[in-house]
């Protein structure tokens, strides 16, 4: 019986380390991470021998060794993780809950069959099935959430796996086991179902949080769009008024030019013509591309660049009608343009330069930004995109670009070359 528990716990510990390895992005190399997980597995196995074999009758030993194992497990997850925050803690606690299910079913199978080997095989298969299902269906979703900068509220979510783990432990293992109280088996099975339902609710909550972030970003974009339209309307109104005045004064200018021609004052005539051209140029509405939404965003960004004294070189080829969602496309252009401006605005005047290229034609979409940079850029190991060093609620621009690229089946790449940072988004539509 004791050795069955040893093997059952060892199987659970092995799958626990696999869970942490697959669902957490690594701070260290793959080889180093595997060794850390293996050493944690060995230490967990050794402490199992202490509580199950050396002091099997001591409730105090069982309790304190279990607490140590919990702390060791969570420390391992946080230690190997590239990000060390409450999201990692939530994942580590959740991993403990999922592997405890295998231990519970191993005990149930042992109780009903009375045979250790079939129960251990069944436990291994249940662990394998759980890991496969979670890996195939939730890993990418989780890592996408894990990579996002904001962590607000996640410490509260950590309470869910904590209370589930405590409930599992007290119902199935301590102070009385399922072997001593087999009537608890139906209750713990339903408890497992309850845990799965609860995690579905948690994931829906996380998904809703992400949607609310997206809605907020879209609202910011629409606000920017509306302000841009207001500015353009004001400029058009002001230009029309100035041109009306110019047209009204043209008859006076014509008379002056005729009079000056008679007097052969050609230099003065040139001054009048120059003045008329200057007034006309000042009241010309800048049109960067045919698409109203993109043109509005570019106009606003150019005005912002001018306020920072940044020289922008534009290369735009954007048609009036876009083959993609123009709001999302404009948001990406605005975010990447703004990131480039923020990066160079504090540089010396001669280095305040940004190149923006946006082409959407012939079934292809291409966006490229180029700007100088000062501080070393930290690239994410999973996405290859730069990570914000400003913490919570920053880096959303790159996340928006990545989401848009994924949606249209494109590719996004960033790299540094000759002192310049390049961001390229390309897609065949």
Image (cartoon, helix red, strand yellow):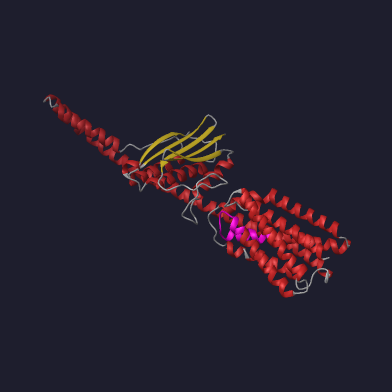
Q: Which residue: 88% across, 63% down? A: 114
Residue 273 is left or right of residue 393, and the answer is left
As for residue 79 lying within the magenta part, the answer is yes
Q: Looking at this view, is 353 or 239 the one in front?
A: 353
Q: Which residue: 45% across, 44% down? A: 334
* Residue found farthest to the front: 54
Q: Residue 348's x, y, as percent?
A: 32, 45
Q: Residue 54's x, y, as percent?
A: 76, 69
Residue 28 appears in the figure: yes
Residue 37 is left or right of residue 322, and the answer is right
Is 215 situated above or below 311?
Answer: below
Q: Residue 113's x, y, as percent?
A: 88, 61
What span is colored magenta in the figure?
Answer: 77-95
Give the quadrant of the N terminus.
bottom right
Give the quadrant of the C terminus.
top right
Residue 314 is left or right of residue 251, and the answer is right
Magenta highlight: main SS: helix
Task: Answer with the quarter of the image where residue 306 lies.
Answer: top left
Is 22 situated above or below 279?
Answer: below
Residue 6 is left or right of residue 308, and the answer is right
* Residue found farthest to the left: 263
As for residue 408 lying within the magenta part, the answer is no
Q: Residue 131's x, y, as percent?
A: 72, 52
- Number of marks in the rendered image: 0
Q: Looking at this view, is 59 or 238 the one in front?
A: 59
Is 375 situated above or below 156?
Answer: above
């Amino acid at each position: 019986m004791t050795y069955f528990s040893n093997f059952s716990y060892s199987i659970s510990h092995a799958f626990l380390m696999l869970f942490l390895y697959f669902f957490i992005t690594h701070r260290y190399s793959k080889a180093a991470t595997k060794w850390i997980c293996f050493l944690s597995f060995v230490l967990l196995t050794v402490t199992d021998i202490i509580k199950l074999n050396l002091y099997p009758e001591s409730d105090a030993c069982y309790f304190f060794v279990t607490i140590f194992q919990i702390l060791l497990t969570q420390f391992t997850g946080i230690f190997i993780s590239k990000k060390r925050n409450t999201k990692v803690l939530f994942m580590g606690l959740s991993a403990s809950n999922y592997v405890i299910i295998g231990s519970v079913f191993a005990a149930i199978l042992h109780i009903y069959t009375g045979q250790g080997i079939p129960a251990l095989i069944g436990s291994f298969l249940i662990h394998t099935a759980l890991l496969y299902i979670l890996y195939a269906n939730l890993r990418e979703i989780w890592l996408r959430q894990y990579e996002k900068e904001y962590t607000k509220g996640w410490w509260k979510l950590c309470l869910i796996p904590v209370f589930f783990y405590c409930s599992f432990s007290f119902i199935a293992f301590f102070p009385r086991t399922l072997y001593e109280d087999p009537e608890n088996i139906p209750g713990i099975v339903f408890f497992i179902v309850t845990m799965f339902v609860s995690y579905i609710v948690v994931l829906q909550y996380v998904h809703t949080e992400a949607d609310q972030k997206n809605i907020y970003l879209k609202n910011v974009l629409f606000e920017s769009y509306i302000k841009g339209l207001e500015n353009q309307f004001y400029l058009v109104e002001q230009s029309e008024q100035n041109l009306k005045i110019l047209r009204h004064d043209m008859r006076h200018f014509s008379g002056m030019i005729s009079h000056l021609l008679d007097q052969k004052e050609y230099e003065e005539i040139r001054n009048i013509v120059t003045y008329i051209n200057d007034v006309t140029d000042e009241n010309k509405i800048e049109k960067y591309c045919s698409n109203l939404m993109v043109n509005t965003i570019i106009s606003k960004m150019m005005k912002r660049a001018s306020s920072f004294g940044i020289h922008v070189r534009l290369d735009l080829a954007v048609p009036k009608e876009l083959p993609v969602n123009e709001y999302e496309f404009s948001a990406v252009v605005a975010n990447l343009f703004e990131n480039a401006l923020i990066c160079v605005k504090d540089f010396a005047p001669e280095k305040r330069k940004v190149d923006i290229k946006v082409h959407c034609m012939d079934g292809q979409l291409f966006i490229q930004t180029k700007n100088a940079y000062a501080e070393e850029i930290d690239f994410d190991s999973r996405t290859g995109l730069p990570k914000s060093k400003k913490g919570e609620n920053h880096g959303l621009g790159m996340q928006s670009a990545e989401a848009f690229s994924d949606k249209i089946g494109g590719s996004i790449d960033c790299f540094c070359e000759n002192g310049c940072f390049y961001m390229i988004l390309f897609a065949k539509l």
